[in-house]
Image: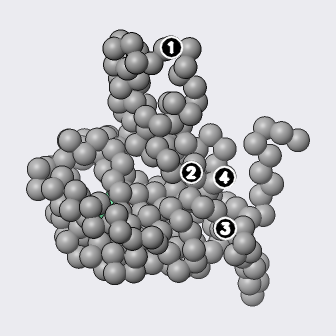
Amino acid sequence: MFFQKKGETLAIDTSRLPKHIAIIMDGNGRWAAKRSLPRKAGHRAGAEALERVVSEANKMGIQHVTVYAFSTENWKRSDEEVSAIMDLLRHYLKNSFQRFLKDNVKMQVIGDVTGLDQDIQEQIKVIEEKSKGKDGMTVHIALNYGGRDELRRGIEKIAEEVASGSLSPKDITEEIIESYLDTAGIPDPELLIRTSGEERISNFLLWQIAYSEFYFTDVLWPDFGKKDLEKAIYYYQNRERRFGGR
Ligand code: FPP
């Protein structure tokens, strides 16, 4: 946990911003329960927080933000909650993303999109296509995503290459593995944020977070805003990153 002294202003060094921030957006349900609202109201407020944070990160000059919107495990939630999140996603793709595109923000989905409804898959394709001409920040939305599932899918493709004779087992380097992940070509996140006081990774970006700094905060995701993002970046900038060296 990070504590800010009263009245202290956080001096962020804009020349040392993380290139990539990963976020586990947790606490929507508790935010709603505190207000005696249905869980879907918490997710709606969470979607608004996402829009806020993407806009701030883009203004700050962050290049990549990856958010955990729906995990491979989230299908275990009630049908009502799953369909509320999927409807929110439909709405998000139609509205928020059109606004992002205007601000030059690109969108990419990571995860097994084939497990999503056909209409959502089509909307994702349209937005990803429209993103191609933009040169601003990229927001990567993890949907039907699990770190182990991502590795399993990548390993399956590598095994196919080996079986067909186009790849030799000895040539399977870390770079080759990386190139078969959903995040191929994206720098690893230097900073991972999880809201709502939980301190777990929950199967998010298992390969990519090997050297990430972790920032955990009690703030519930729907309450997360500019100040909280700045606090997390300040914390990251004041950590010493050694990558196993001395
Ligand atoms: C975690 O809160 C949140 C989720 C599982 C869903 C994340 C979804 C959003 C932030 C909505 C916006 C995203 C899109 C684009 C659909 P929780 O429900 O686990 O909260 P709790 O732990 O307090 O119950």
| Local crowd size for mark 2, using a 10 Å CA cut-off: few (<14), some (14–19), many (≥20) | few
Q: In this view, does 126 lie above or below 75?
A: below
Q: Which image quarter holds the N terminus?
A: bottom right
Foreground residue among 4 and 123: 123
Foreground residue among 182 and 239: 182
Q: Name the residue under label 3.
A: 17
- Describe the element under mark 4 as helix, strand or loop: strand
Q: How far apart are marks 2 and 3 (CA)?
A: 13 Å
Amino acid on which disc 1 is placed: Pro
Q: Distance between the residues labelled 2 and 1?
A: 25 Å
Q: Name the residue under label 2.
A: 187
- Describe the element under mark 3 as helix, strand or loop: loop
Callout 2 touching callout 4 (CB < 8 Å): no
Callout 2 touching callout 3 (CB < 8 Å): no
Q: Mark 4 points at which residue?
A: 213
- Sooner in the amino-acid sequence: mark 3 or mark 4: 3
Quarter where residue 91 is shown: bottom left
Q: Name the residue under label 1.
A: 169
The image quadrant in which ligand 1 is located: bottom left
- Sooner in the amino-acid sequence: mark 2 or mark 4: 2
Amino acid on which disc 4 is placed: Glu
Callout 2 touching callout 1 (CB < 8 Å): no
Foreground residue among 105 and 237: 105
- Describe the element under mark 2 as helix, strand or loop: loop
Q: Which residue is drawn at 76% across and 83% down?
A: 8
